[in-house]
Amino acid sequence: MPQTVPVSQLPAHLTKVVAPLYAVLGEEDLLRDTALALIRHAVLGADGNDFNCDVFYGDEAEGAEIAACASEIAAFAPRRLVIVKAADKLAARQSEMLLPYLKSPNDTTSVIFVAAKLDGRLKFSQALLQASVVVDCGPLKDSQLLPWLQQEADRLGVRIDEEALHLLREVSGGSLSAVRRELEKLASYVPADRAATAADVAALRGTQPGASVFDLAAAIGAQQRGATLAILARNLEAGEAPLRILGSLVWQYRRLWKVKELVKQAGREGEAARVLRMDPYRIRPFLGQFSETHLREAFRLFLETDQKLKGGSGGKPAMLLDQLMLKLCSRPQPTRSPSPAAPASRGRTVSNVRTISVTRPKN
């Protein structure tokens, strides 16, 4: 019966048993590296005795050579380790030479086949999946990402608040390696006596003054097309990845919606001001620029742009972001009903100043 183990559960698995065959599969290269390191430590110990470790590459190795190496007895150690990287690159003829070994593996050797994906039509792939412990290194689901971030932060010794965790998730652009780099920078930057904040994350990402996601959202809220495009251009010129810019804006919009609900339901302008780092008297006018209709349409546009950026369709990334910003800025202004005509009056001057009643946008 094939067994599948997520990377998060691999340490617990290895404390119970070290299997003779592992298939480390999935598109997340960081998770594959993590799984490989965990199995290597379990087989060879903390010192990592390289004498009992051999590494092959699928686009170069021969199946018979891999099988012969895996069949050897460990020297001066209880177990051997054989790693086959890019196992999906093994030629069909070479992979079939491994079929007898997969049926009867050496109990004192652990063989790890590493690949982003295997061709399920091949006999080798089918036999490997049946005989090995499969370590799932696929992309994390949204519900898994925050716990993974917290686990990595704990491993690096970084205390990080919830707001900073959410920002890291949104700006990662789907890359766990990018998040790991940001966490490593936070570990070096933030003093041990306090938790890392969203401001720390923004500062270490190199955001230029006047070009942060806060400035971008403010320009969109004020429908300042020129300023919005200028802030976007500044970020792109600084080397920011389009997906990271989009992720930052999505994070800010989620926060705006959350704060808007907070003020609407409880009238807690003080708390909202602390979250958005604004003066309390500016909160309601600022949030009034983002109606619920606009927020819902914005998230539809975010999803559409994300799909185009990841799919490589619809034009160049900079052009796609320009189009997104213009659409966000182009929402219609609230319509106002015309003031009734003033009755004619004799002997007194009628003021030419109209009284405009400000109606609160429906949320």
Image (cartoon, rainbow, N blue to C red):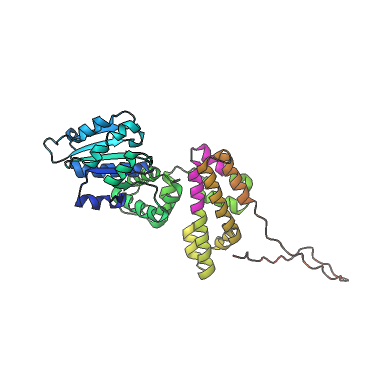
Residue at the (33%, 39%) spot, across then down: 123
From the top left corner, tell me how far across and down residue 304 is, in percent: 56, 49
Please report the residue visible at 55 percent of the width from the left and 40 percent of the height from the top. Answer: 317
What is the chief secondary structure element of the magenta stretch?
A: helix
Q: Position of residue 52 (x, y in %)?
A: 18, 35
Image: magenta residue range: 230-251
Instruction: Tell me where residue 257 appears, x and y as whole percent.
Output: 52, 60
What residue is rendered at 27% in x and 45% in y? 131
Instruction: Using the image, determine if residue 283 lies above or below residue 39.
Output: below
Left or right for 80, reference 204 = left
Residue visible at 33% across and 31% down in the picture: 93
The answer to which image quadrant residue 320 occupies is top right
Toward which corner of the image does residue 142 lie, by quadrant?
Answer: bottom left
Depth check: 76 or 122 in front?
122
Q: Is residue 63 visible?
A: yes
* Frontmost residue, 353 versus 157: 157
State yes or no: residue 267 in magenta. no
Task: Please state if 119 lies on the left or on the right of 52 as rendered.
Answer: right
Labels in figure, total: 0
In front of the other: 58 or 352 = 58
Q: Confirm whether the magenta stretch covers residue 238.
A: yes
Do we see residue 278 in this rendering? no
